[in-house]
Amino acid sequence: MAKIVVLGAGIAGHTAAAFLRKKLSRKHEVYVVAPNAWYQWIPSNIWVGVGRMKVDQVRFRLAPLYKRWGILFHQAKATAIYPEGVDGNNRAAVAIEYTDERSRGTTALLDYDFLVNATGPRLNFEATEGLGPGKNTVSVCSYDHAAHAWEQLQVALGKMKNGEKQRFVIGTGHPMATCQGAAFEYILNVAFEIRRRKLQHLAEITWITNEYELGDFGMGGAHIKRGGYITSTRVFAESFLNEYNIKWIKRSGVTKVEPGLIHYENLDGEQKTIAFDFSMLIPAFAGAGLKAFNNSGEEITAKIFAPNGLMKVDADYSAKPYEDWSVNDWPETYRNPIYPNIFAPGIAFAPPHAISKPMTNKNGMQIFPTPPRTGMPSGVMGKITALNIINLLKKGEHELKHRASMGRMGAACIVSAGFGMTKGAAATMTVFPIVPDFDKYPEYGRSLGYTMGEAGLAGHWLKWFMHYMFLHKAKGYPFWWLLPE
């Protein structure tokens, strides 16, 4: 009998736990440890943030589902890993601290045979002074943040209805933030809601980003096939912003936010400010803050985790210059090289390097996006992690069959720009591979046969459909396993 502990119930963790439980006999135990009682479909938080969906349309309780599936659920946060055991006991374990109302603050040790670290990111608002909910900006990174964003957006819209001009600044809130796609989608939806109310003459909307060019999205940009032509994602992104009369500031990193005032620095080393009445800025991401200790109690966190707190896996972490970066640097199995019974799929793994070209200004500030790993890639990583653990249990140690390098994996992204059966719109884009492979595709680094983009109402219908399809899958409804990640 084996005991598998999954840390996190986001896309990667929930997917891994679902496949582990479905494909393993009940003699094996599957545990999920997550600090939140709810699963949330994060891509639809955008719609919560503009009042088009309620919170309960994007979330559901985990405990009843896991009970039905036969998964043991602990509402708790993991604090430390003991991969060699604790106090002379060689049984690997993870320390957890309960977060539910009844047991809040109590701690426990949970031993394991396999550990799946799918904790996802810590929203590192603290990395930018004054950033985030409860301070000077809003967020759509979680359902409660998105609900708060909608409350604040309604205040701004109310002032506009009374004839007062409002300044909206949306984008990335740290020089090395990722998730540009989520912020881009939110600014388009905010602009749509303003236009729907015929208030655009009272709105000044600005996109602020650490991208070198718009449409980089942390992937170094892409060239896409659209309507028989080849165009860059820069043109794709700029055309959408132009359509909604949105200004932009690029190549800039936000350094501080005061009430109504954003401080930022650009690649030329200039320090500037922009005033706002409403601002949603994506924070930097970091690891969940797990520590690690050996059997003697010595801290070994630096051996298992990168400096940003994300876990090291089967990637090439050597400090190569940008010119030597390769698609082969990226992990395929998300297995820790020191402790092979630990895996880290999704955002929890440490990328070997950025995908976008690193940029540093004359003041020494790095300003460029870190790699995106949300949504579809996280689901695929979670699934192959589960399948590899299942094979290890059935066959013993062997070369892992299931692999999913971001350099061999495609991704589909649908950026909504409005809501409604007849008036919504979306930009639909597929990219293959996520990490450019210039050896295989020397001209653009990606296959033009699978990298394409279109805009229109049909894309919005597709995003709407995907919202319900992926919640159907996450809730374990009939034939959930047949749906793609």
Image: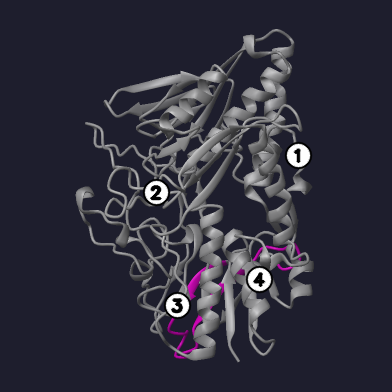
Above or below, comparing residue 107 to residue 92 in the picture:
above
Q: First in sequence: mark 1 or mark 3?
A: 1
Q: Amino acid at mark 2?
A: Ser
Please check the rendered image and state whether residue 399 is part of the magenta-colored stretch, yes or no.
no
**In this figure, which residue is indicated by the disc labeled 4?**
18
Q: Residue at x 74, y 74 (%)?
A: 69
Task: Using the image, tell me which numbered label, if any, was put on residue 425.
Answer: none
Circle 1 sits in a helix, a strand or a loop, which is it? loop
Q: Residue at x 42, y 60 (%)?
A: 310
* Distance Cα–Cα, label 4 vs label 1: 26 Å
**In this figure, which residue is indicated by the disc labeled 2?**
447
Q: Nearer the viewer's eye, disc 2 or disc 1? A: 2
Residue 173 visible within the image = no
Task: Using the image, tell me which numbered label, if any, was put on residue 401.
Answer: 3
Looking at the image, residue 446 sits to the left or right of residue 290; the answer is: left
Q: Quadrant of residue 464?
A: top right
Q: Amino acid at mark 1?
A: Met
**Residue 25, image x, y percentages:** 67, 87
